[in-house]
Image: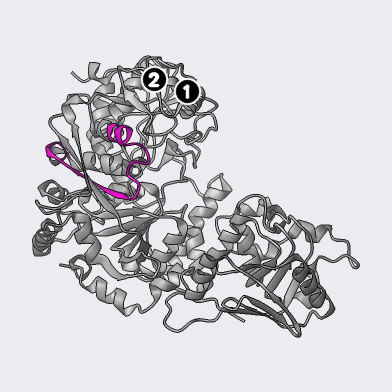
C-alpha cells in the first residue's frame, strides 16, 4: 500500500509501510549492481525499474538459482530485506530511484551506505536498520512464507510479520522527516495552496500593475 | 528603521514559515533549461502534479546546444535526448519554450532580461547557479538544484533559509581598461569564494549607480562564485530605461505604475545591513585568475603567489601544479591557446562592442583559436547589424551561434588536452571547459580580446587608448 498521508501535515507523511517482502542475501551490494552504469546515460529516471539488478539477474542460472527479483512469488513486494552495507559504491541516485520505481517502498537491512540512505530519504523510501540476527530471522520467515504481510511502523520502530516481531530503527532526523512529511518538500509546499494563491495575488506584477 | 530590498521582497513573497525553519517563498518567475529540468518533470508525472503556474514559467535551450551546426538530431545522443525531453515536457505541461529556431533563444540569464521577463521586485528561480545575474534588476534570484526545480514547477514556491545582507559599496571611477568583471573578480578575491555563505550581496555606491545594466549583470552573475546565495542592485532610472518597451515589460500607464512600485522596493536610505564592505574603483587594475577557483586571482602586473606565503599552502601548490605555473611568476606574458568571449557573465552586446574595439584592425595570433559566442540570438543579430560580427571575423575570430558554449564543456565546444584558455566566463575549476587538464584564465572580454591578438596574457590598458 502507499505511504499514509497524515492529515494537514503538509508533505506526504510516511508513518507505516505494509506489504509483502523480498529477501536479497549478501553483504556490500553496491549501486553498480543495483543499477548498472550504462543505464545512467538517460536524462531522466523514467523506465529505470526495468534495469534493477539487470546484470545480476542475467547471470543467475535458471531455474535453480533465480534472482529474487525474478521469483514469481516476490513480484509486487513492497519491502526489500538486505544484509550489511547495502548501496555502497558510487553515489548514483538512480539506484534507489530504480528500486522505488520497481515497487519497493521501504528497505530493512543490517546497515546502509550513507549516500544511498540519504538518496532514499529524498524519495520517501525509508531504510531501516535491524540487528543481524533479526534480519536473518526475517529473511527465513519470508522465504518460508513469501505471502506473509509485513508491517513496518516508523513511530514504534517495529517490524511485524505474522508472529515474527523485531525492532527496527531510523536515525531520529530521518524518522522525524518521514513522520512529519518534511522529506516531501514539494508536498509541503503544495499544502493549503489557497495561501499560495493569496500571497501571489498581493503582488502587483502578478496582477498586471 | 529602514528595510533592505532583500527584506522587502522576501516579506512580500512569504507564504508561511515552515516547520523545517525555512520560509516558503512564492516565485515570480521560473526560468527552465534542458539540463536541470528532465528529472524534475519526471517527478511531476510520477506524482500526477501539473505545473502550478505555466504563466510564470519560461524555458529555453542553452547548455548543451552546439554553436556551430544546429541541425537536428544532434550527433550527441544525450544532447538530443535532453532537447527532445524539454520540447516534450513544455508541450505536455503547457510551458512556453524559446527553442532552437526561436529568435528569443539564448543563454537563460541573457534572454530573461532581454525579453523583459526579469523585473525589479520579483523572486526568480532557475536550475542554474548563475541565476544571481537577474539580481541586477533588483530582483531576488536563486540558482536552484533539480529537486527544487521540481518544487517550483509543482508549487511555484521554494523552501529556503533566511539570508543576511552584506552591502558592497563600490566608489569612485574605474580607469579605462578596467571593467565590471574586474570589480567582481576583485570582490571575490578579497572576500573569498566562501565569504558570502548565508548572505545576499547588495552592490551599491556611485560606481555601481553609474553602471549600465550589462555591467550590473556581470557583477551580480558572479555573486555566487563568492559564496553569496544571491546578489542584487537597487533598481533605478537606468533599470527602468532598460526595461521600457521590452516584450514582457508592462506597457503604457502600467509601466508608469510599475515604476512607482519598483522604486518602492529599493533598500531604504536608513536600511540596516549585517555587514558593509567598500571597494575603491580607482585602485583596481585588470584582474586575471591564475588558479582553479575564481578567488585565485591577481592584478595583471602582479605575480602568482608562493605556497609558503599563504594560509593554505596545499591549495596553492595544487593550483599552481594544475596550471603549470611557478610561484612568483608573472601572469602577464603567459601563452594562451584559446580565447573565448561568451557566457552568461560577458556575452552581451556591450561586451562584444568593447572586445571588437580592441581587435578592430588587428588579427588573432596564429597559434590561437578564438571564438565569439553571443549570449542570445538577439545579441547576435544586433551585433551583426552593427558590423561587430564582421570585425571579429576579419580579425580571425570564429563567430558562433548563441549558447553556453565553452564556458562549461557540455557541448562540442571544449578545450583539448592542457590548452590554456583566456575566457570571459565565470568558472576556472579543473576540467570546467571540457578537458580534464584544460586550464582557464578568467578575465574581462576586452582582456580576452587583447590576449587573442597578442597570443598571450597582456594588459588591456595598453590597447584601449
Across and down, in percent, residue A50 comes to 69, 65
To the question of a shared chain for discs 2 and 1, the answer is: yes
Q: Residue at x 45, y 54 (%)?
A: B34
Q: Earlier in the sequence, mark 2 or mark 1?
A: 2
B378 or B288: nearer the viewer: B288
B423 inside magenta stretch: no
Label tally: 2
B187 inside magenta stretch: yes
B273 or B225: nearer the viewer: B273
**Marks 2 and 1 close (CB-CB < 8 Å):** yes
B307 or A66: nearer the viewer: B307
Q: Is residue B309 left or right of residue A131?
A: left
Point out the stretch of residues depicted in magenta: B186-208
User: Helix, strand or loop at disc 2?
Assistant: loop
Q: Is residue A141 left or right of residue A149?
A: right
Q: Residue at x 26, y 66 (%)?
A: B13
User: Helix, strand or loop at disc 1?
Assistant: helix
> Can the viewer see residue A53 in this picture?
yes
Tell me the chain of label 2.
Answer: B
Q: Which residue is mark 2?
A: B304
Gap in angstroms between the C-alphas marked 2 and 1: 9 Å
Q: Is residue A165 left or right of residue B186?
A: right
Across and down, in percent, residue A65 comes to 88, 65
Q: Quadrant of the C terminus of chain A?
A: bottom left
Q: Which mark is residue B320?
A: 1
Q: Residues within 10 Å of mark 2 (few under 14, many from 20)?
A: many
**Above-or-below relation of B308 to B443:** above
Q: Quadrant of the N terminus of chain A?
A: bottom right
Tell me the chain of label 1.
Answer: B
Q: Residues within 10 Å of mark 1 (few under 14, many from 20)?
A: many
**Above-or-below relation of B182 to B151:** above
Across and down, in percent, residue B231 comes to 27, 47
Amino acid at each position: 500500500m502507499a505511504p499514509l498521508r497524515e492529515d494537514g501535515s503538509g508533505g506526504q507523511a510516511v508513518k507505516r509501510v505494509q506489504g509483502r517482502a523480498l529477501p536479497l542475501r549478501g553483504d556490500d551490494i553496491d549501486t553498480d549492481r543495483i543499477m548498472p552504469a550504462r543505464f545512467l546515460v538517460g536524462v531522466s529516471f523514467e523506465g529505470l525499474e526495468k534495469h534493477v539488478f539487470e546484470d545480476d539477474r542475467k547471470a543467475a542460472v535458471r531455474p535453480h538459482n533465480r534472482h529474487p527479483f525474478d521469483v514469481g512469488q516476490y513480484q509486487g513486494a513492497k519491502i526489500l530485506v538486505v544484509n550489511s552495507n547495502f548501496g555502497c559504491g558510487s553515489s548514483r541516485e538512480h539506484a534507489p530511484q530504480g528500486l522505488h520505481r520497481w515497487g519497493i517502498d521501504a528497505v530493512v537491512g543490517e546497515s546502509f551506505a550513507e549516500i544511498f540512505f540519504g538518496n532514499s530519504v529524498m524519495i520517501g523510501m525509508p531504510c531501516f536498520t535491524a540487528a543481524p540476527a533479526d534480519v536473518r530471522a526475517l529473511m527465513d520467515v519470508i522465504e518460508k512464507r513469501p505471502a506473509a504481510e509485513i508491517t513496518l511502523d516508523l513511530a514504534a520502530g517495529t517490524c511485524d510479520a505474522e508472529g515474527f516481531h523485531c525492532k527496527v530503527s531510523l536515525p531520529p532526523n530521518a524518522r522525524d522527516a518521514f513522520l512529519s512529511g518534511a522529506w516531501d518538500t514539494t508536498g509541503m509546499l503544495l499544502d493549503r495552496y489557497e495561501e499560495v494563491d493569496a500571497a501571489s495575488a498581493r503582488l502587483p506584477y502578478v496582477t498586471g500593475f | 528603521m529602514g528595510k533592505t530590498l532583500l527584506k522587502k521582497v522576501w516579506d512580500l513573497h512569504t507564504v508561511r514559515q515552515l516547520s523545517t525553519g525555512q520560509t516558503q517563498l512564492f516565485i515570480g518567475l521560473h526560468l527552465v533549461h534542458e539540463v536541470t529540468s528532465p528529472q524534475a518533470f519526471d517527478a511531476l508525472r510520477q506524482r500526477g502534479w501539473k505545473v502550478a503556474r505555466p504563466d510564470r514559467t519560461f524555458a529555453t535551450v542553452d547548455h548543451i546546444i552546439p554553436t556551430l551546426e544546429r541541425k537536428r538530431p544532434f550527433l550527441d545522443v544525450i544532447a538530443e535526448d535532453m532537447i527532445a525531453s524539454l520540447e516534450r515536457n513544455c508541450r505536455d505541461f503547457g510551458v512556453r519554450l524559446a527553442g532552437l529556431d526561436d529568435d528569443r533563444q539564448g543563454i537563460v540569464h541573457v534572454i530573461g532580461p532581454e525579453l523583459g521577463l526579469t523585473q525589479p521586485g520579483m523572486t526568480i528561480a532557475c536550475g542554474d547557479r548563475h541565476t544571481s545575474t537577474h539580481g541586477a534588476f533588483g530582483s531576488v534570484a536563486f540558482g536552484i538544484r533539480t529537486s527544487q526545480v521540481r518544487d517550483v514547477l509543482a508549487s511555484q514556491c521554494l523552501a529556503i533559509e533566511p539570508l543576511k545582507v552584506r552591502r558592497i559599496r563600490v566608489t569612485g571611477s574605474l580607469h579605462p581598461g578596467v571593467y565590471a568583471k574586474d570589480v567582481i573578480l576583485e570582490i571575490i578575491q578579497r572576500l573569498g569564494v566562501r565569504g558570502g555563505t548565508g548572505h545576499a550581496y547588495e552592490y551599491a555606491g556611485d560606481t555601481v549607480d553609474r553602471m549600465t545594466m550589462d555591467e550590473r549583470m556581470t557583477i551580480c552573475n558572479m555573486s555566487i562564485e563568492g559564496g553569496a546565495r544571491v546578489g542584487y542592485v537597487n533598481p533605478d532610472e537606468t533599470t527602468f530605461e532598460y526595461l521600457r518597451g521590452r516584450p514582457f515589460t508592462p506597457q503604457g500607464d502600467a509601466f508608469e505604475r510599475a515604476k512607482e512600485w519598483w522604486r518602492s522596493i529599493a533598500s531604504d536610505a536608513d536600511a540596516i545591513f549585517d555587514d558593509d564592505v567598500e571597494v575603491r574603483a580607482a585602485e583596481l587594475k585588470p584582474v586575471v585568475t591564475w588558479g582553479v577557483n575564481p578567488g585565485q586571482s591577481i592584478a595583471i602586473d602582479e605575480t602568482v603567489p608562493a605556497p609558503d606565503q599563504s594560509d593554505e599552502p596545499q591549495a596553492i601548490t595544487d593550483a599552481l601544479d594544475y596550471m603549470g605555473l611557478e610561484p612568483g611568476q608573472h601572469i602577464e606574458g603567459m601563452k594562451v591557446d584559446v580565447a573565448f568571449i561568451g557566457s552568461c557573465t560577458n556575452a552581451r552586446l556591450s561586451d562584444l562592442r568593447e572586445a571588437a574595439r580592441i581587435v578592430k584592425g588587428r588579427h588573432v595570433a596564429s597559434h590561437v583559436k578564438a571564438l565569439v559566442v553571443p549570449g542570445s540570438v538577439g545579441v547576435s543579430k544586433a551585433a551583426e547589424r552593427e558590423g561587430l560580427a564582421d570585425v571579429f571575423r576579419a580579425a580571425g575570430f570564429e563567430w558562433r551561434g548563441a549558447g553556453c558554449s565553452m564556458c562549461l564543456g557540455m557541448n562540442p565546444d571544449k578545450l583539448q588536452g592542457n590548452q590554456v584558455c583566456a575566457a570571459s566566463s565565470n568558472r576556472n575549476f579543473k576540467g570546467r571547459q571540457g578537458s580534464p587538464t584544460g586550464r582557464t584564465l578568467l578575465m574581462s572580454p576586452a582582456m580576452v580580446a587583447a590576449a587573442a591578438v597578442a597570443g598571450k596574457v597582456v594588459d588591456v590598458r595598453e590597447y584601449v587608448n
